[in-house]
Image (cartoon, rainbow, N blue to C red):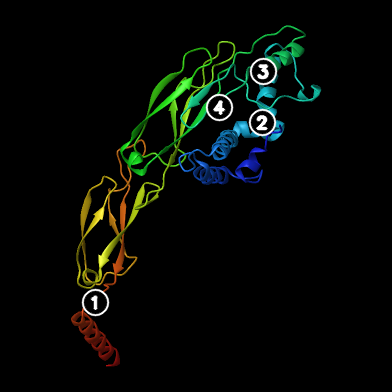
Amino acid sequence: MARRDYYEILGVKRAATEKDIRQAYRKLARTYHPDLNPNDKQAEARFKEIGQAYEVLSDAEKRKHYDRWGHDFEKIEQARKAGASTGGGFDPSGFPGGFGGSRPGGARWTATDFGGTGASPADDEMLGSIFDQIMGGRRTAARSRGEDIDHPTTVTLEEAFNGTMRRIQIAPPDGTPQVIEVKVPAGVTDGSRVRVAGKGSLGRGGGAAGDLYLVVSVRPHPRFTREGDDLTTVVDVPLYTAVLGGEVLVPTPKGTRLALKLAPEVQSGQRYRLAGQGMPKLGSDGRGDLYAEARVLVPTSLSDRERDLFTELAGLREEEAAS
């Protein structure tokens, strides 16, 4: 079955910028993430497809080779390197029928959390026959580092605020499946990549293993909106407090509430900055800010006395406007 074009998968043009590709990936990853589509095999398959496309197009070097050779670029590049190491040359156009579409890198590697990626043993056999043609029948394994593996995981805003751990099951091609614990640091954002050294695909010809990367998605929060390291939350302000001034409580991602003193005549949409109460800054001791956005509440179920007072107030305002 023909593999879909990576640009088509992400819905971007071939001239798309790195930012365009990153934004398209984040939007699609949120839509098809297994957390949001439980027991949906089609969504899970789409999510893996999106991750594979992003892995290539977000890497400038891989993208350049993909643009030139298509899905066969990894085999072609390895074969070219193998030919160069023995003084020979390699012209991929000289192989009728082209190459298979899977990534090279040895026997199967999988990671279990929301699925994994890997190569088929058939890829090794095909690549071996290519080497035989290049070397005139002398098969020589090129030494190369194993591929890095991207593995998606989702965290809540609270986990992104405090930091958390993820247990990931990996199945190396030459051993028993093992569970590793990965620390997700405080301050991670959508698209953050957490590196686990040496847990990717095995290298070829004695080369070093690649790395495993946790690609983090942060689940939207019902109360807080995040922009970088800053957070915004809406705070209800009773009409009387908005008019006369007073104090309201502002929720924080820690689960606590902070008292905020308001001056009289608060307007809906007015924002108040609580410095250093936002998200931790990834890799540093700093913190972003928390913004409280006022939402003035109009009272309901007025008593007759309250209605009379509001009527009197409206009359006073009209008199002042007329004078």
Earlier in the chain: of badge 2 and badge 4, it is 2
| Residue 65 image label | 2
Where residue 31 appears, as percent x and y from the top left, is 52, 46
* Disc 2 residue type (three-letter): His
Q: Quick one: SS at disc 1?
A: loop
**CB under 8 Å between callouts 3 and 2?**
no
- Label 4 and label 1: CA atoms lie apart by 63 Å
Q: CA distance from mark 3 to mark 4?
A: 15 Å
Q: Position of residue 223 (x, y in %)?
A: 34, 53
Please report contact status of discs 3 and 4: CB closer than 8 Å, yes or no.
Answer: no
Circle number at residue 302: 1
Q: Which is nearer the N-term, disc 3 or disc 1?
A: 3
Q: Specify the amino acid type for callout 1.
A: Leu
Q: Tell me the SS state at disc 4.
A: loop
Marks 2/1: CA distance?
70 Å
Secondary structure type for disc 3: helix
- Characterize the local packing of mark 2: few (<14), some (14-19) or many (20 or more) Cα atoms within 10 angstroms: some
Give the mark nearer the N terminus: 3 vs 2.
2
Locate residue 122, reporting x and y percent. 67, 18
Question: Within 10 angstroms of label 3, few (less than 14), some, or many (20 or more) residues?
Answer: some
Task: Give the position of the N terminus as an image quadrant.
Answer: top right
Residue identified by numbered label 4 = 117
Residue shown at 52% from the left, 23% from the top: 110
| Label pair 3/1, CB-CB below 8 angstroms | no
Q: Nearer the viewer, residue 151 or 18?
A: 151
- In the visual, does 41 lie left or right of 265? right
Q: Earlier in the sequence, mark 4 or mark 1?
A: 4
Q: Which of the 4 quarters of the picture holds residue 280? A: top left
Say whether disc 3 or disc 4 marks the residue closer to the N-terminus: 4
Q: Secondary structure at mark 2?
A: helix
Residue 282 seen anywhere in this rendered image of the structure: yes
